[in-house]
Image (spheres, rainbow, N blue to C red):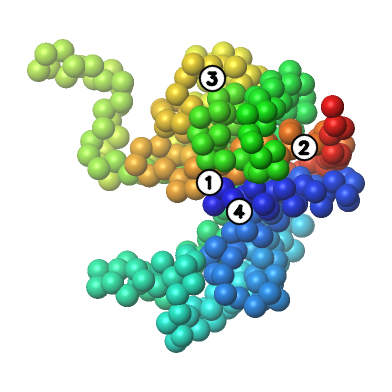
């Protein structure tokens, strides 16, 4: 996956550098769709694959807005149309694959193999829906998070300077300067980069709300004194649904000093990969977002290519609102140019 990310990111940034000003969120969405689509279904004809990429791009989370906004209904129409067309392409691909019995090593093969097991939870409809959901969600949330991260970086030159130092040091140690980011570099040489990503995700709060079900009575803020229970809180009865708003935690001044400030250094010395009760950007407990590692890796690869190869400036800052999912009221327009050789 990291090889595909490197290639797509490098090519898209090179293309965008020649275009001038561009919308960063749209650019990241396009690059993710370009390499994810063949990994989902790899034997489509070039024209059909291009159409499916366009359908994935059109079927996005922008529809989740206020029903009172006139533009909402136009977006919903486009989304429903894109969904219908994408599902038809996936359905046709599934039918041909089942008839041919050819193995292409993509995710469709994996799902077909599982679907034929006796105890499989998949049928044809769920396979089609899963391929559609992965194609859409993988690009949407990660492109929003990346745009917000770059917007925050543009206002903090000291953070950019530290990022460049870390990534330039990686380049200096690399034998092949043209090679993309390696898995080892990502795992072991990106401490400050992970601090930046954690802080960006904390502030962006892409997961607006989490739902959990109480399997038994849960006492909140109660106290035990020996065998006697002295309740000073309240009880969540078994079977009730609990809604958790991560932003309440992420913006809590008792947990994070100056919580609205973008400060990657607050993560210094902390475990940057573990899930905690104070950082729930990808959910919590055993039901974490399946795309958590994917999003972190893509954001890291993007940062690496951006800060080592280009100078960038924000032409128009993005503004975000929640309805309840994060939506942009303005595009993040940036301009990039190749760095001058030293």
Residue closer to the observer: 95 or 278: 95
Mark 1 element type: helix
> Measured from the top left, where is residue 194 in percent x and y?
56, 29
Instruction: Note whether 128 is above or below 135 in the view shown.
Output: below
Specify which label sits upstream in the sequence, 1 or 4: 4
Residue at point 50% right, 84% down?
96
Residue closer to the observer: 144 or 172: 172
Specify which label sits upstream in the sequence, 4 or 2: 4
Question: Which label sits on residue 309?
Answer: 2
Question: Which label sits on residue 130?
Answer: none
Question: Alpha-carbon distance for marks 3 and 4?
Answer: 29 Å
Few, some or many residues within 10 Å of mark 1 (<14, 14–19, 20+):
some
Q: Which residue is mark 4?
A: 4
Q: Which residue is mark 1?
A: 294
Mark 4 element type: helix
Mark 2 element type: helix
Residue at point 77% right, 37% down?
309
Specify which label sits upstream in the sequence, 3 or 4: 4
């Amino acid at each position: 996956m990291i090889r595909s990310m490197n290639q797509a990111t490098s090519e898209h940034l090179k293309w965008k550098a020649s275009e001038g000003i561009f919308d960063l969120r749209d650019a990241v969405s396009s690059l993710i769709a370009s390499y994810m689509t063949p990994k989902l279904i790899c034997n489509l004809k070039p024209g059909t694959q291009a159409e499916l990429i366009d359908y994935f791009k059109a079927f996005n989370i922008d529809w989740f807005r206020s029903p009172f906004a006139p533009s909402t209904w136009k977006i919903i129409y486009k989304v429903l149309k894109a969904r219908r067309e994408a599902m038809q392409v996936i359905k046709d691909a599934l039918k041909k694959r089942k008839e041919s019995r050819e193995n292409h090593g993509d995710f469709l093969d994996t799902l077909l193999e599982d679907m034929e097991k006796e105890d499989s939870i998949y049928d044809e409809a769920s396979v089609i829906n899963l391929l559609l959901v992965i194609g859409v969600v993988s690009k949407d949330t990660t492109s929003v998070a990346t745009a917000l991260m770059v917007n925050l970086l543009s206002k903090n030159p000291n953070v950019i300077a530290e990022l460049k130092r870390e990534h330039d040091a990686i380049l200096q140690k690399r034998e092949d300067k043209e090679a993309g980011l390696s898995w080892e570099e990502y795992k072991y040489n990106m401490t400050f980069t992970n601090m930046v990503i954690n802080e960006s995700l904390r502030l962006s709060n892409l997961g607006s709300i989490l739902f959990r079900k109480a399997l038994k009575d849960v006492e909140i803020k109660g106290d035990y004194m020996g065998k006697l229970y002295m309740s000073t809180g309240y009880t969540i009865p078994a079977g009730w649904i609990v809604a958790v708003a991560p932003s309440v935690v992420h913006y809590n001044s008792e947990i994070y000093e100056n919580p609205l400030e973008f400060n990657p250094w607050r993560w210094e010395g902390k475990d940057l990969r573990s899930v905690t009760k104070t950082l729930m950007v990808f959910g919590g407990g055993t039901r974490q977002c399946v795309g958590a590692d994917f999003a972190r890796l893509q954001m890291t690869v993007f940062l690496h290519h951006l800060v080592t190869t280009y100078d960038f400036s924000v032409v128009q800052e993005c503004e975000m609102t929640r309805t309840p999912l994060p939506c942009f009221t303005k595009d993040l327009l940036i301009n990039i140019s190749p760095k001058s050789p030293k």
